[in-house]
Amino acid sequence: MLSYTKHKHKTSNKWVTFVHGAGGSSTIWYKQVREFKKHFNVLLLDLRGHGNSKHNFKDVFSDKYTFDFITNDIVEVINHEKIEKSHFVGISLGTILIRNLAEKHPERVESMIMGGAIMKLNLRSQVLMRLGVIFKSVVPYIWLYKFFAFVIMPNKNHKESRLLFVREAKKLYQKEFIRWFKLTSEINPLLRFFRTVDIKIPTLYVMGREDYLFLPTIEKIVANHSTSDLFVVEKCGHVVNVEQPMVFNNTVISYLRQL
């Protein structure tokens, strides 16, 4: 089972489950935990191969990775904790897992908070992925990760986010990184489906104004999906919860408390 941490609230029966992205860990939510646990029960996950889940699975290199496979890891934890329904907060690739969980188990998802959401790989993103596929076996993965982190988070004010993700990515195994990389290079059909289907679950996208690769697609999705809202954080890039934590926390907590 995945490694996870929980914080129980004295009176609230509402749960908020945090899902990090590829190469990260539950530690990326360190600027959120204090505020969120004032209002909700909080569950923080380390995805397979990441953080404290790195040594949890003897078959970590032998299993075939799919989005359903990794989503089921999350479901296993909430089943174990007897959490019938939760709000889910994700960042980057974690938003794809949350959206997939909502597709497979909509009755378990009270709402989705999608920070730095990835719902389409534009031409630049696809070129980067193809380059990664070509070089993933001959170039140290951390070089690739640093390169991708810089492309996605290029500005000076994105530096803290870049350094945080690179630091966490260094804890991955090379083979584990390649498995996740292969996963992200095969997501176009899944994302196309997600963009088309309005799932009718309350969804708040929290995007940085400087998230140039992914914001334009989210704007189009919100215009077409009836239960989706968008909050754009000014002077902010991809990792909104790290770069503008006060804005992120206040916006998301206010949204969740109104549901």
Image: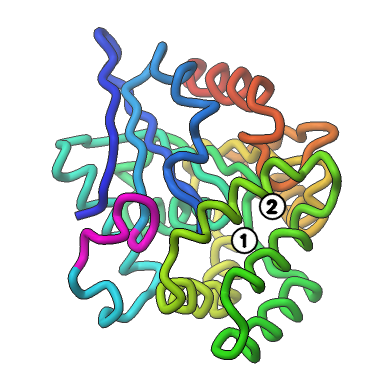
Query: What residue sits 76% from the left and 59% below the top?
Result: 150
How far across and how far down the image is residue 225, in percent? Answer: 63, 47
Per the model, the C-alpha gap separating discs 1 and 2 is 6 Å
Residue 54 shown in magenta: yes
Quarter location, residue 136: bottom right
Residue span colored magenta? 48-57
Q: Is residue 171 above or below residue 114?
A: below
Type of secondary structure dominating the magenta stretch: loop
| Quarter of the image where the N terminus is located | bottom left
Q: Which of marks 1 and 2 is nearer the N terminus?
A: 1
Q: Is residue 14 above or below residue 197?
A: above
Query: What residue sits 41% from the left and 70% below the top?
Result: 173
Label ID, residue 195: 1
Tell me the SS state at disc 1. helix
Q: Are the residues at dot 1 and dot 2 in contact (C-beta closer than 8 Å)?
A: yes
Q: Nearer the viewer, residue 198 or 39?
A: 39
Q: Is residue 208 above or below residue 249?
A: below
How far across and how far down the image is residue 194, in percent? Answer: 55, 62
Q: Mark 2 points at which residue?
A: 221
Residue 141 shown in magenta: no
Would residue 30 be found to the left or right of residue 2 on screen?
Answer: right
How far across and how far down the image is residue 108, in percent? Answer: 30, 42
Would residue 69 be found to the left or right of residue 240 on screen?
Answer: left
